[in-house]
């Protein structure tokens, strides 16, 4: 096999870097994590001309090589470590034609590392609209590189980029300016101390306050011992360096770029006048949220009903086709209902991710950050906390990772701690099924009661997050320096391909990630529900037959009694009865108790668990919902899922911390078990108390 | 006239004169907030905070607490 070319895609946020990545790799991409940290690692394979292949890494967006977050560290760590297997043979710096000046800062830094570098100028379709003209040959000469002028929107220039990557060996590795002029003496000393090292690399290692885990530790220590300047001196030098680079860029662009302001039209100003308006801005934001919830409810209903009934008939079909026995029962009663409990939520989760992807891609999310910052600050949060809190409606895990761009540690920690209160997609299955059981049909102002209940639950989650943030802000005594810089990118019509890939990728990881846990738990539950110790379970048939001998029951009724007797005395029944005293005051029976306990692994297990427990011993083809509706409270004789117990359950799930993966992420992001354990105990205790009060009040 | 960036009104423009305060994050400089560049206040959120700026074509938002450290010249207005 011939060697693949390692390509690193680097660029500022909002330059369409991911679009370039998608255009190069198409569906040949995978998303993983960098080892040890939770920064998303996107890589893919691209076929180049003449049978050559390139391995492409989409590095996190960054404004410069001066890292201020974990995501940005990834970029420098890779570029400074020649021994990394992903070390690029060629770097592709993606820039946006409208922000070329700012984008070139990063470009000049990467050039200083003497890595062959191609400059991509993206969004070239906007040039005419903005009155921009570029002198490409001049720019190529000054910047000592090859330039690919592309438009991922119009699918132009990608072939030229592929051609340039193939011929990367022809690129110059000379830096395009001499940054060491900012302090000649200092850099001369540095050069003498480490004659074999690249000067700019040394400078980065000296100035960065980051952990260069992968770079040879001794090397760094040796350099640190050289440190002859204090922190504020270094910062001043960094400022000088930045100014120096901009001088070079300004001079280059003065000749290489002309902008005719007369032909420039600006949609941004007109849109921002409304979207960031003091009143309209907030109103529009609220309407957008409302639309999302209504859509999740109404649009997803048809495919969900279809999936539900398909899985019910699938179970039935398996039972008819396969020979009778324990294995058939495991498939029909354990695996299929368990899987059905997850597959059914694909439509809604896909819709949710679709909306979030569109909000992010269009540039609207930054406006929300702008609008909300002042309000959020009152509660100890940042405007940037809005993004985690909103994407927390999909999943708390990426949401907690998204807190990384919050500059202040205190604001970031509070955001991490309260994000699990927002209603994540894993709560959705529980909410949806309970709402459909206990909230009446009907409409208010064209919105269904059920959709309004769902909206209310989201608001409760959000409210709990805000309130606890306020509380934490009062309690936590952390001093950390705060600053807040957020780019307001241009508005863009989201690219269908990008949105579709995001939705596909996220939904897939939800289904497979959660699916694995659910499948495993379903199988274990089936065993526990199908077998039991002692007389009562093994001789269930005789005992029940004897008990009802005089009642003249039909065979069907008798079978039903036997099945439920068996379930009561199975392993799971025994465990369920043991915890029943704790949950009875909340209006639940032992079966719900089992579902709650198993959903401490992951919330969405709840529905699958009930589906498995209820289907054991039942022969009829039935949907999960119908089975739940039929359950009777053994003490009161009323339906088990009534208004009081339903509300109690909804509130319990709204507040309880039931997700092992989230706890693991919080541990990783805060570097201590203290915070996740605190979250688990406080949130769950609070959930219990609220659910208790609600049930006792409503019953 | 020399004032800080926090003093200007919506729609007003100025030229950045000094960003050497230690309270200004390097990131802001990297995004183009440098002496000599034009700055315009595009929009403000309620209570005039944060401020939505246009610095030489780069649009970004910063808090007032950072803006008070950026000196600008509005003589040409």
Image: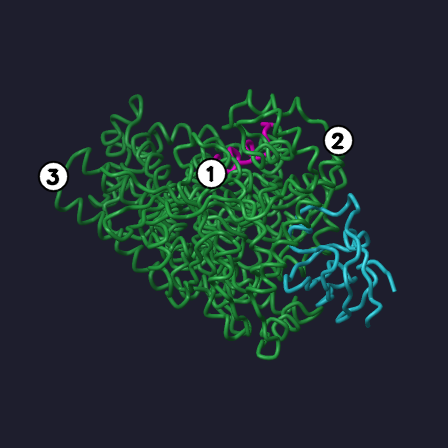
Q: How many marks?
A: 3
Q: Gap in Å between the C-alphas at discs 1 and 2?
A: 56 Å
Residue A11 lies, in percent from the top left, at 51, 51
In the visual, does A594 lie left or right of A678?
Answer: left
The residue lying toward the viewer, choosing from A572 and A258, is: A258
- Within 10 Å of disc 3 (Cα), the crowding (few <14, some 14-19, many 20+) is few
Chain identifier, green in the render: A
Query: Which quarter shows the N terminus of chain A?
Result: top left
Q: Secondary structure at mark 2?
A: loop
Marked residue nearer the N-terminal end (1 or 2): 2
Q: Which residue is mark 2?
A: A230
Which residue is most to the right? B1
Residue A177 lies, in percent from the top left, at 58, 47
Q: Which residue is mark 1?
A: A596
- Within 10 Å of disc 1 (Cα), the crowding (few <14, some 14-19, many 20+) is many
Q: Chain of mark 1?
A: A
Q: Which residue is mark 3?
A: A323
On the question of residue A681 being in view, the answer is no
């Amino acid at each position: 096999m011939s060697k693949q070319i390692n390509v690193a895609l680097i660029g500022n946020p909002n330059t369409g870097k991911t679009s370039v990545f998608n255009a190069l790799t198409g569906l040949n991409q995978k998303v993983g994590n960098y080892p040890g940290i939770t920064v998303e690692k996107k890589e893919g394979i691209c076929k180049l001309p003449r049978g050559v292949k390139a391995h492409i890494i989409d590095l996190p967006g960054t404004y410069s090589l001066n890292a201020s977050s974990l995501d940005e560290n990834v970029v420098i760590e890779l570029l400074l470590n020649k021994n990394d297997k992903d070390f690029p043979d060629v770097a592709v710096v993606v820039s946006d034609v409208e922000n070329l000046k700012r984008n070139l800062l990063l470009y000049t830094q990467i050039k200083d590392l003497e890595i062959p570098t191609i400059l991509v100028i993206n969004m070239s379709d906007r040039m005419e609209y903005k009155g921009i003209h570029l002198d490409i040959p001049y720019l190529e000469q000054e910047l000592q590189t090859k330039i690919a002028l592309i438009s991922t929107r119009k699918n132009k220039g990608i072939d030229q980029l592929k051609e340039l990557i193939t011929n990367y060996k022809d690129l110059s590795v000379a830096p395009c300016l001499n940054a060491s002029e900012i302090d000649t003496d200092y850099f001369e000393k540095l050069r003498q101390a480490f004659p074999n090292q690249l000067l700019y690399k040394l400078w980065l290692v000296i100035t960065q306050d980051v952990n260069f885990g992968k770079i040879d530790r001794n090397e760094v220590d040796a350099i640190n011992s050289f440190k002859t300047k204090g922190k504020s001196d270094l910062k001043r030098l960094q400022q000088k360096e930045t100014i120096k680079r901009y001088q070079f860029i300004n001079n280059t662009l003065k000749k290489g770029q002309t902008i005719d302001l007369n032909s420039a039209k600006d949609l941004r100003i007109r849109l921002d006048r409304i979207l960031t308006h003091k009143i309209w801005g907030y109103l529009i934001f609220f309407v957008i949220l409302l639309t999302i919830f209504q859509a999740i409810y109404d649009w997803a209903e048809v495919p969900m009903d279809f999936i539900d009934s398909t899985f019910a008939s699938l179970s039935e079909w398996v039972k008819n086709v396969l020979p009778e026995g324990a294995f058939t029962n495991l498939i029909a009663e354990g695996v299929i209902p368990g899987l059905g409990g997850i597959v059914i939520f694909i439509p809604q989760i896909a819709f949710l991710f679709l909306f979030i992807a569109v909000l992010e891609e269009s540039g609207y999310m930054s406006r929300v950050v702008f609008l909300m910052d002042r309000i959020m600050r009152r509660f100890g949060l940042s405007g940037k906390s809005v993004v985690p809190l909103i994407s927390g409606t999909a999943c708390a895990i990426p949401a907690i990772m998204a807190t990384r761009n919050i500059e202040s540690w205190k604001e970031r920690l509070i955001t991490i701690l309260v994000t699990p209160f927002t209603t994540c997609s894993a709560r959705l299955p529980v909410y949806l099924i309970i709402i459909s059981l206990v909230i009446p049909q009907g409409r208010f102002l064209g919105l269904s009661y059920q959709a309004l209940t769902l909206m209310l639950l989201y608001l409760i989650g959000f409210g709990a997050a805000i309130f606890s943030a306020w509380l934490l802000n009062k309690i936590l005594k952390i001093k950390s320096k705060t600053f807040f810089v957020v780019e307001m990118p241009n508005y863009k019509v989201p690219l269908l391909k990008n949105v579709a890939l995001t939705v596909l990728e996220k939904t897939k990881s939800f289904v497979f990630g959660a699916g694995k846990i659910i499948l495993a738990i379903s199988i274990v539950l089936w065993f526990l529900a199908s077998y039991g110790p002692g007389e009562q379970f093994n001789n269930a048939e005789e005992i029940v037959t004897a008990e009802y001998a005089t009642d003249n029951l039909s065979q069907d009724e008798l079978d039903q009694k036997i099945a439920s007797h068996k379930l009561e005395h199975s392993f799971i029944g025994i465990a369920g009865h043991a915890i029943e005293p704790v949950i009875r005051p909340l209006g639940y029976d032992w079966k719900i108790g089992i579902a709650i306990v198993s959903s401490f692994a992951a919330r969405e297990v709840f529905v699958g668990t009930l589906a498995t427990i209820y289907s054991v011993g039942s022969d009829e083809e039935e949907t999960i919902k119908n089975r739940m509706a039929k359950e009777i409270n053994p003490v009161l004789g009323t339906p088990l899922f009534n208004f009081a117990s339903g509300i109690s359950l909804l509130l319990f799930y709204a507040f309880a911390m039931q997700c092992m993966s989230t706890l693991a992420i919080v541990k990783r992001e805060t570097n201590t078990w203290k915070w996740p354990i605190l979250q688990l105990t406080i949130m769950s205790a609070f959930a219990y108390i609220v659910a208790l009060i609600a049930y006792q009040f409503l019953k | 006239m020399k004032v800080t960036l926090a003093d200007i009104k919506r729609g007003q423009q100025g030229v950045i004169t000094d960003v050497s305060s230690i309270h200004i994050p390097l990131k802001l400089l990297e995004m183009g907030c440098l002496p000599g560049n034009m700055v315009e206040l595009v929009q403000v959120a309620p209570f005039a905070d944060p401020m939505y700026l246009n610095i030489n074509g780069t649009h970004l938002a910063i808090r007032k607490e950072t803006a008070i450290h950026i000196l600008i010249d509005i003589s040409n207005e």
